[in-house]
Image (cartoon, rainbow, N blue to C red):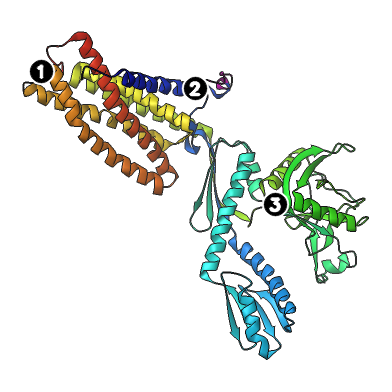
């Protein structure tokens, strides 16, 4: 008991020293920590939405739009497959939740069925006479939904990260919903604008043979689309048409974009967006512009035309620029959206809540008061009941709180209001191990042991009980973290960290303090 190996002493003191070092930045404001030397820890505890204020959004992914898009693509696949085998058909189209086609050659119905069954996985093919239907089955719909939601979460994360928001909470909720919490966001309307746009950009050649007037009246030529012009904040040019008739076929897809940045036009000094394609996209862009010199080329974003400039010369470098009467903020946001990628499906905001920073400050103040009150009562209780040994336990308790803060800072874990409750609970639990040891020491003293023998027996015999008690609580906390929602996770995080640090301070630090006291004072009796 009296002897502690030097490496153990060094390890314990090093852990405590690092704890104070990593917790220190929380005593300063965020601007001051930026001036710290590079080798000095500068990370602070991240405050959650309920403490820092910010925005809470519940989004719904419109999976139906993806299913519809897949069915439209399936129509083209069916047409190609049937034409390749020279099977005559009629009434091919997408209606409701499936694709339907009528085969005109009765002897080729079975061949057509086998062809359509191989086009798309997760779709069922049924035959009713000469009419064949292709519909997504339950597994296919589930795969589409899961893939769409997962991709949407990733794109949302990219867009939010681009805005500089620290520690956002982005997680799936239910089958087709996304929970988004943005601590410290001071412009929630901009975030909503960024999330409200699918940002699917494509390039189309214009249909120069069709009539826009007839298309506006509902007579759109086959293979063409009537698309409106995006109305910018500046209103656009007076002589610019409000609709464009474009070819339905996509000349170049936006999925080939690898970068986009806001900039300014050297001639007009207007805000523009510069973009760059990957190798395949650059080659395709070059081929299209080479073959269509002096023809207009529409840039389409979410089924609206940004602009339709005339191709003056082939664009061979794989890069270009978009100008559409943007403001500086519009150009910056459009570049961000294109850089982050297009959403696979539209997002609908189902629920929106805003937490003011004042409410968060009140929560922090209340949490501090609760923590201080709990800490003071525990300190007084330990001193009254266990005397000098209670003082050792109180020192370990204070170090334990510092270690919790340091771990939260180092891991950049988010502290929430339930997390503060976990810290308050840890304050009470942190002395449990010491209480077990001290009571065991009392029993050994009553049994007639010497002070050193009683203290040594108290620690060695109580250790298994301490580990068992904390291990069961740790398992429960891990399960809470794994399966709980946001607030429960916040409580579980601080509880897990508190259990681990309290085990260290109770078993290692308090024992070191007691051992040091024994070596200095050589007691004849245990003051407990």
Mark 3–mark 1 distance (CA, rounded to whole Å):
78 Å
Mark 1–mark 2 distance (CA, rounded to whole Å):
46 Å
Q: List x then y, in percent, for residue 462.
A: 19, 31
Mark 2–mark 3 distance (CA, rounded to whole Å):
40 Å
Q: Secondary structure at mark 3?
A: loop
Along the line of sight, the residue nearer the viewer: 132 or 306: 132
- Label located before the other in sequence (2 or 3): 2
Q: List x then y, in percent, for residue 289.
A: 87, 54
Q: List x then y, in percent, for residue 193.
A: 66, 46
Along the line of sight, the residue nearer the viewer: 327 or 174: 174
Residue at x-position 24% and y-position 38%: 468
Residue at the bottom extreme of this rendering: 106
Q: List x then y, in percent, for residue 331.
A: 76, 42
Is 428 positioned to the left or the right of 342 in the image?
Answer: left
Q: In which quadrant is the C terminus drawn?
A: top left
Residue tagged 3:
199
Residue 225 can be seen in this image: yes
- Label located before the other in sequence (3 or 1): 3
Residue tagged 1:
450
Is 82 positioned to the left or the right of 510 in the image?
Answer: right
Is 502 positioned to the left or the right of 456 in the image?
Answer: right
Quarter where residue 2 is shown: top left
Q: Which numbered dot is residue 45? A: none
Query: Mark 1, mark 2: which one is toward the viewer?
Result: 1
- The stretch drawn in magenta includes residue 34: yes
Quarter where residue 32 is shown: top right
Query: Mark 3, mark 1: which one is toward the viewer?
Result: 1
Residue numbers of the magenta segment: 32-39
Residue tagged 2:
25
Q: Secondary structure at mark 2?
A: helix
């Amino acid at each position: 008991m009296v002897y502690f190996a030097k490496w153990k002493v060094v390890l314990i003191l090093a852990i405590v020293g690092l704890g104070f070092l990593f917790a220190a930045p929380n005593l300063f404001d965020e601007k001051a920590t930026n001036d710290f030397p590079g080798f000095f820890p500068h990370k602070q505890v991240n405050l959650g939405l309920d403490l820092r204020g910010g925005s809470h959004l519940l989004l719904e992914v419109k999976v139906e739009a993806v299913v519809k898009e897949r069915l439209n693509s399936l129509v083209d696949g069916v047409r190609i497959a049937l034409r390749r085998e020279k099977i005559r058909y009629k009434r091919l189209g997408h209606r409701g939740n499936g694709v339907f086609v009528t085969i005109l050659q009765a002897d080729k119905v079975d061949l057509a069925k086998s062809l359509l069954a191989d086009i798309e996985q997760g779709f069922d093919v049924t035959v009713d006479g000469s009419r064949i239907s292709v519909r997504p089955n339950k597994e296919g719909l589930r795969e589409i939904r899961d893939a769409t939601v997962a991709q949407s979460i990733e794109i949302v994360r990219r867009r939010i990260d681009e805005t500089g928001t620290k520690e956002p909470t982005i997680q799936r909720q239910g089958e087709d919903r996304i929970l988004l919490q943005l601590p410290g966001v001071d412009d929630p309307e901009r975030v909503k604008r960024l999330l409200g746009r699918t940002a699917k950009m494509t390039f189309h050649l214009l249909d120069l043979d069709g009539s826009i007037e007839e298309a506006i009246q509902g007579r759109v030529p086959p293979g063409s689309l009537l698309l409106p012009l995006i109305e910018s904040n500046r209103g656009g040019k007076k002589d610019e048409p409000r609709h464009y008739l474009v070819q339905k076929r996509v000349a170049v897809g936006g999925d080939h974009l690898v970068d986009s940045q806001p900039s300014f036009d050297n001639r007009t000094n207007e805000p523009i967006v510069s973009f760059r394609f990957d190798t395949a996209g650059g080659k395709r862009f070059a081929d299209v512009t080479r073959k269509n010199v002096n023809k207009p080329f529409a840039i389409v974003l979410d089924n609206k035309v940004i602009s339709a400039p005339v191709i003056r010369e082939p664009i061979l470098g794989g890069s270009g620029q978009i100008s559409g009467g943007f403001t500086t903020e519009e150009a910056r946001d459009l570049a961000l959206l294109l850089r982050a990628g297009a959403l696979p499906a539209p997002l609908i905001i189902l629920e929106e809540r805003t937490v003011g920073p004042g409410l968060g400050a009140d929560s922090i103040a209340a949490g501090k008061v609760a923590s201080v009150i709990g800490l003071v009562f525990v300190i007084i209780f330990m001193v009254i009941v266990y005397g000098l040994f209670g003082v050792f336990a109180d020192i370990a308790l204070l170090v334990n709180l510092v270690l919790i803060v340091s771990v939260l800072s180092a891991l950049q874990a988010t502290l929430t209001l339930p997390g503060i409750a976990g810290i308050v609970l840890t304050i009470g639990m942190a002395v449990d191990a010491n209480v077990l040891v001290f009571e065991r020491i009392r029993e050994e003293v009553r049994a007639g042991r010497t002070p050193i023998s009683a203290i040594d027996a108290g620690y060695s015999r109580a250790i298994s009980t301490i580990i068992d008690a904390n291990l069961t609580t740790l398992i429960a906390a891990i399960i809470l973290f794994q399966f709980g929602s946001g607030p429960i996770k916040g409580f579980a995080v601080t509880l897990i960290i508190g259990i681990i640090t309290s085990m260290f301070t109770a078993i290692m630090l308090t024992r070191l303090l007691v051992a040091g006291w024994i070596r200095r004072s050589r007691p004849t009796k245990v003051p407990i």
